[in-house]
Image (cartoon, rainbow, N blue to C red):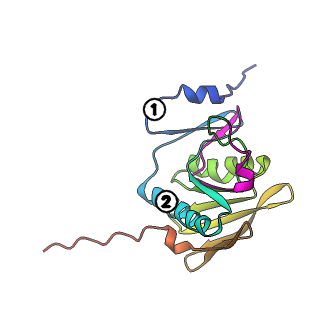
């Protein structure tokens, strides 16, 4: 009988510092390369808009790429999270690691089937199981944002937003962000003189 090796948070500490991102979901190791500029730009913009909204309301905290340790076999790095101040009061361990579900997680897709599977299936299931209230999947190639909201015991697709739409959320009163503002404008072609 063949047993599949299950990875733990202790295994992550042994991974090389090689510019890859290592995550564990249900004991399965996921490795992704350093994200592209388009990916990083979308993350930066989302975090900026959430942070500006937080400055006005004082309701929560937005963090880029925090470690999120749900358990020894569920140790991931969402691209952006938002957590209310009330939940944040008990959501971090003594070392400052996030150990409880934030209300909102955001993943910006990276190209490739393995990356899509991780964000669209494995992380969707993880965030559903662990109590995240809302999950945004941002696709900078298609310029869309899929919004998943908790429907009783699981996250379900609520809407898919495109250029021209605005992101709004019942979690974030009066928050609005234009989908088009999350993406880099295609670079202009150089003309030869």
Give the secondary structure at mark 1: loop
Judged left or right of residue 90, residue 12 is: left
* Residue 44 tag number: 2
Q: Residue at x 72, y 23 (%)?
A: 3
- Residue 88 on the magenta segment: yes
Judged left or right of residue 112, residue 71 is: right
* Residue 17 tag number: 1
Give the class, few, some or many, for how many residues have Cα within 10 Å of label 1's Cα (few <14, many ≥20).
Answer: few
- Residue 41 on the magenta segment: no
Q: Position of residue 164 (x, y in %)?
A: 56, 80
What residue range appears in magenta? 70-93
Give the secondary structure at mark 2: helix
Q: Residue at x 67, y 25 (%)?
A: 5
Q: Position of residue 31 (x, y in %)?
A: 54, 39
Based on the displayed image, in which of its 4 quarters is residue 34 positioned? top left
Q: Position of residue 13 (x, y in %)?
A: 56, 28
């Amino acid at each position: 009988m063949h047993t599949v090796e299950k990875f733990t948070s202790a295994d992550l500490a042994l991974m090389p510092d090689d510019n890859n991102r290592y995550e564990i979901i249900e004991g399965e190791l996921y490795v992704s390369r350093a994200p592209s500029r388009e990916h990083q730009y979308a993350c930066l913009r989302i975090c900026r808009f959430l942070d500006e909204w937080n400055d006005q309301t004082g309701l929560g905290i937005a963090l880029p790429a925090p470690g999120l340790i749900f358990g020894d076999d569920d140790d991931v790095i969402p691209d952006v999270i938002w957590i209310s101040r009330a939940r944040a009061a008990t959501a971090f361990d003594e070392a400052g690691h996030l150990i409880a579900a934030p209300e909102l997680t955001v993943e910006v897709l990276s190209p490739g089937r393995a990356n899509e599977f991780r964000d669209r299936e494995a992380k969707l299931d993880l965030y559903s199981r662990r109590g995240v209230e809302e999950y945004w999947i941002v696709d900078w190639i298609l310029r869309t944002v899929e919004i998943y909201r908790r429907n009783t015991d699981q996250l379900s697709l609520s809407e898919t937003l495109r250029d021209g739409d605005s992101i709004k959320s019942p979690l974030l009163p009066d928050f609005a962000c234009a989908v088009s503002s999350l993406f880099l404008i295609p670079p202009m072609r150089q003309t030869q003189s």
